[in-house]
Amino acid sequence: MTDSNRVSRRDFVKTAGSAAVASLVLKETSLATVAAPAKRRYAIVGTGERSIGMWGRPLIQDYKDLLEFAGLCDINPKRVAVAKKMLGVDCPTFTDFDQMCDQAKPDLLMVTTVDGFHSNYIARGLDRGLDVMVEKPMVIDEKQCQEVLDAEGRNKKKIVVAHNYRYAPKHQKIKEIIMSGAIGRVISVDFSWYLDVSHGADYFRRWHRLKSKGGSLWVHKASHHFDLINWWLDADPVEISAQAGLEVYGRNGGFRSTHCRACPHTSNCRFFYDMTKNASRMALYAGCEDADGYHRDGCVFREDIDIYDTMSAVVKYSTGVNMSYSLNAFMPIEGYRLAFNGEKGRLEVRDYERQPWPVEQQTEMYLTRSFGQREKIDIPDIAGGHSGGDKRIRDLIFMKGEVPLHMRLPDSRAGALSCLTGIAARRSAELKRPVKISELMRVPAKA
Ligand SMILES: NC(=O)c1ccc[n+]([C@@H]2O[C@H](COP(=O)([O-])OP(=O)(O)OC[C@H]3O[C@@H](n4cnc5c(N)ncnc54)[C@H](O)[C@@H]3O)[C@@H](O)[C@H]2O)c1
């Protein structure tokens, strides 16, 4: 292993390893036993912001001796060219995936397109013998889910689903407290996630506003949360009863336009977003929109919006746990409230991501033992995307340290179950009846 790898490895430990979470640091593979890995030929399909900021720049910086950029692909020829310039790489760019595979010959693929196209690229990548990683959500409906599992089944390669939230130290801490038995058997869960008028509204500006592209926030967003719950509980979702509505965005607006830059109502629109102030978005999106009509500052009141902004569900799990869950996307606050109610106690979490008042700490966590005292769990604030989860999952993917079983990378089964929970919730809300996961598809047993 090279010196620069050692430095990155130390950073990994430092990110995760402040005093209170020191016991949670991922175990390291003995450096002496790791042979210098050959450079992987790395390709990305879908070159928007996430691919540049999460799967582009940091890889160039941290793993340049492990990876070489073999190709970039996007259906928008202008955006892929801008992305290449922003990354400063000299690999070829493509608008056709097969051409990229034939000419650039990658062996490692990252899929970061619009969600509705993930399954197609995953299957084609696997069929070409590539190692495939995909951003969440893995798929947006059960048919795509089956196609992905079938593609994996007929190939030797395994998918990694980038459920980064698991790798935020605070989320690892929750997992390990539950595993420790401190609150005994978990009987129920209360989980409410709040998206604010900035982040929440952003989903209504773009392709996420259409079920056909992102599967609705039940899948696009809640799959993050459902993956965490499935993992924390070490349980499979079984049945979902849900309700949902569109109460603030879309047709609820009193006026509308196509996008903010062309809008005559900017002075009286609370959701006006002035993208011209963001040079990088102007280059990557506005400068390329004539090629695909993608307005990054789309109007949140467009009448074609067919997703929901308020969602609630009761989810039954294979272990008998019941979870009450809600997601609202028009809040003055960003963050979540979470509680695990166990037979011997309760673990409570309040996460303050953004709010119009100061807070001392982003995450408050309390463990209260029944007939006992309340204990504050110290969760230091950690800088970096998704509370440190982005860097830690990247390190684990590319540096392949040895980790305890519960910290292993999320696989296709985890990707499937997180999406199927959302797909079942969406269907339940629309059919106005409970929906069983088994109605959607047969999920393979745990390996
Ligand atoms: N894990 C996380 O926390 C997290 C955070 C943000 C985004 N994401 C995921 O990352 C992915 C990308 O999100 P983003 O915010 O960068 O979106 P984006 O809209 O900025 O970028 C998507 C890109 O995909 C391209 N594209 C669309 N259809 C395509 C197709 N058929 N073939 C090839 N390219 C196509 C678009 O032209 C665009 O460049 C999404 O799946 C999203 O869910 C995950």
Image (cartoon, rainbow, N blue to C red):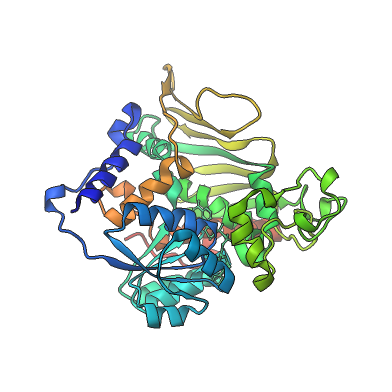
User: Residue at horizontal 57%, vertical 67%?
Assistant: 79
Nearest to the observer: residue 424 or residue 141:
141
Q: Position of residue 90 (x, y in %)?
A: 40, 68
Up-down relation of residue 172 to residue 357 (above or below)? below
Q: Position of residue 78 (x, y in %)?
A: 58, 70
Residue extending furthest toward the left = 32
User: Residue at horizontal 38%, vertical 60%?
Assistant: 411
User: Residue at horizontal 60%, vertical 60%?
Assistant: 283
Left or right: where 253 falls relative to 273? right
User: Residue at horizontal 76%, vertical 47%?
Assistant: 272
The quarter of the picture where residue 284 lies is bottom right
Would you say residue 138 is visible in this rendering? no
Left or right: where 100 falls relative to 194? left
Tally of numbered tags: 0
Would you say residue 119 is visible in this rendering? yes
Q: Quadrant of the C terminus?
A: bottom left
Q: Position of residue 55 (x, y in %)?
A: 43, 57
Left or right: where 269 falls relative to 87? right
Q: Position of residue 120 (x, y in %)?
A: 50, 74
Ligand 1 image position (quadrant): bottom right
The quarter of the picture where residue 220 lies is bottom right
Up-down relation of residue 314 to residue 56 (above or below)? above
